[in-house]
Image: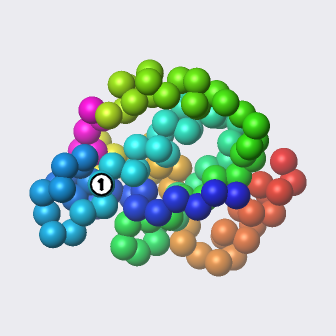
Amino acid sequence: MLLLHDTVPLTADTAGREHRTGFHTGDAWKIVPCLRLLRPDLRIVTLPAAPTGLTVVTGLDPSSTRLRERRAVIHAAYATLPPDGVVAAPQHPLALGLNEPQWMARWLRQARAQ
């Protein structure tokens, strides 16, 4: 299981590559749509936990080199991805779940069963 923080961009200014504000999360959120597209075998959910989200990824294969082999292509495709669309409508690109213990426990049970 992998946990990623700062995966729900709050505003375009705080979620960009360049640090322009006092509060800055950067563009870590880009890993979520990237993994969802390139690794459909993974189970991914993003919790809208304060302040900027927490993404849970299961089904990882430590021996997989798929992402490493495509690193240059991935970087080229996602480096310039603007946060505006994800800030406006985060549900689909970030696979938003519910920030509720019972919901997350059910999600984890289902992830283990697969």
Q: Residue at x 81, y 63 (%)?
A: 109
Q: Which residues are magenta?
A: 80-84
Screen quadrant of the N terminus: bottom right
Q: Is residue 105 visible?
A: yes
Query: What x and y, as percent, mark residue 51?
Result: 36, 73
Per the image, the residue denoted by label 1 is 26
Q: Quadrant of residue 10?
A: bottom left
Give the main secondary structure, helix, strand or loop, of the magenta stretch.
loop
Q: Is residue 92 visible?
A: no
Query: What x and y, as percent, mark residue 8?
Result: 39, 58
Is residue 46 a member of the stretch shown in magenta? no
- Residue sticking out furthest to the left: 20
Query: Residue 110, relative to residue 76: is it above or below?
Result: below
Q: Residue at x 58, y 61 (%)?
A: 3
Q: Is 82 on the left-hand or right-hand side of 72? A: left
Q: Quadrant of residue 93?
A: top left
Query: What x and y, as percent, mark residue 78?
Result: 37, 32
Q: Residue at x 83, y 57 (%)?
A: 112
Residue kind at label 1, given as amino acid type: Gly
